[in-house]
DNA sequence: GAAGTAAGCGGACCACGGTCCGTTTAAAGT
DNA sequence: ACTTTAAACGGACCGTGGTCCGCTTACTTC
């Protein structure tokens, strides 16, 4: 197994201080019956292993179920559908990135000025998405669901808030959407991996876009 | 039937003068055997009718096939997969929009200055996408395919070219991607139809984005 | 107009996502 | 400990997207 999935907190780990947002970072573990929580962990672990071994294309709900030693219905009960399972895997991996921009050290974290945090945010997200592009692409089946995924709405509120703090020009919420759109995983993957565009150029465009709205580094 | 699908040119209509791009607008009719071309038209017509009658969700490959009086395999042979069929339907409906910005009257068409054409482009595309959002959303299953759809790459080259002509600041190609991303159908649908954002605000953001890059109306 | 051939055709077939419902079981009350 | 109940379980079942392959047919060549 490539990623042995560190502890995998069944109950949400306590004693974490949120930095600047009311939105819960990862979400959805909630209160589960003991067997349900155990199976949830087993399923995520099995899915992660299968993903590493066989790739996202071969990750069928039945294979995950049997690898975890549970019935197929259980997978659907827990994650609603295949996309839900993939998103759960992603949210779990997003935790590190979230920690970095919510409570990590400068330039991403809260101890840097908002403008600096914004400039650092784009390249970091692009790197993160590059690392997980297979999973991300596989999870993008319903185009509308993108906007309701916890990780994505956290990113949006975060960027919107920073834009306000940095006194960016224009409409902060829409600008946040535009900024996030310009570094969206499928686009970046298309440009870099398929059209051969150098990543620096994308970083540059990110900085430029911010600068045009008055967010000076 | 709501949209009786005007003539539906089997062979690509001749004698059309391209305005500013080498890229073929709609694409893919190519040279088909007589029966194949006939079936293609039958299938598109049947699909269009089913779409209007029952909605995209109930548009199954088998229902389209039998409504057109052909076998299921024929649908797949012609359109590759379900997404291919939906994209073909979309490309057909895109023709009017393409005519408007490639050869229509100002402010979209070639007789207006590039800056004016750019400002007019966004709102027009948003309106067009709003009209066809069901089909567009249904066709967005593979996130990467978006960028290779003929209609989309035509839009991209068009905007890139106009940005160059208008002497926009920054990286024209990436800016074109960002601009198009900011009016992408799923995003716009999410914001207007689900979050209740007024469409003017989106138009405003489009103009603002252009202005920030030196494209004055 | 006969023969040859590449393309098109169609429906049986398969795999996977998703649902359903009878059975089991964890937990709360007594 | 015993009862109760809502939640979880699991696997049979279904519909649909997609493939496959033997048969048919439109075009070409002579």
Image (cartoon, coloured by chain):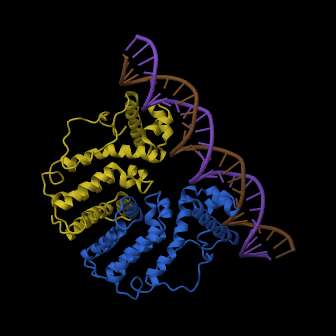
Chain colours: A blue, B yellow, C purple, D brown
In the displayed structure, B100 sits above or below B170; it is above
Instruction: From the viewer's perspective, tell me whether residue C19 is left or right of residue A155.
Output: right
- In this view of the protein, which residue sits in the foreground, A102 or C13? C13
Question: Could one spot residue A23 in this view of the protein?
Answer: no
Residue B124, horizontal then vertical, whole percent? 25, 55
Q: Residue at x 28, y 54 (%)?
A: B155
For the N terminus of chain A, the quadrant is bottom right
To which quarter of the image does residue D2 belong? bottom right
A30, A163: nearer the viewer: A163
Quarter of the image with the C terminus of chain A in it: bottom left
Query: Farthest bottom residue?
Result: A111
Relative to residue A113, is residue B100 drawn left or right? left
Q: Residue C3 at what x, y percent from top left?
A: 46, 16
State whether residue A89 appears in this view. yes
The image shows residue B24 at horizontal and vertical percentages of: 27, 45
Q: How many marks?
A: 0
Residue A168 vs residue B24, the one in the foreground: B24
Q: Residue at x 43, y 71 (%)?
A: A153
Q: Residue at x 18, y 53 (%)?
A: B108
The percent position of residue B207, horizontal first and vertical second, equals 22, 65
């Amino acid at each position: 197994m490539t990623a042995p999935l560190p502890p995998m907190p069944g109950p949400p780990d306590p004693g974490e201080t949120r930095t600047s947002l009311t939105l819960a970072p990862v979400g959805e573990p909630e209160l589960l019956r003991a067997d349900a929580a155990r199976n949830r962990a087993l399923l995520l672990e099995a899915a992660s292993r299968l993903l590493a071994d066989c790739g996202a294309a071969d990750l069928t709900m039945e294979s995950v179920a049997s690898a975890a030693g549970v019935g197929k219905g259980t997978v659907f009960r827990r994650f609603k559908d295949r996309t839900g399972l993939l998103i759960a895997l992603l949210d779990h991996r997003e935790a590190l990135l979230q920690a970095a921009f919510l409570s990590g050290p400068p330039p991403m974290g809260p101890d840097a000025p908002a403008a600096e945090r914004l400039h650092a945010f784009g390249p970091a997200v692009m790197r993160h998405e590059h690392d997980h592009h297979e999973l991300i692409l596989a999870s993008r089946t319903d185009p509308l669901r993108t906007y309701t995924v916890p990780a994505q709405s956290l990113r949006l509120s975060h960027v919107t808030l920073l834009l306000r703090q940095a006194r960016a020009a224009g409409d902060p919420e829409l600008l946040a959407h535009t900024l996030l759109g310009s570094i969206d995983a499928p686009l970046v993957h298309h440009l870099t991996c398929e059209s051969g565009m150098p990543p620096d150029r994308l970083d540059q465009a990110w900085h430029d876009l911010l600068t045009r709205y008055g967010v000076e580094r």
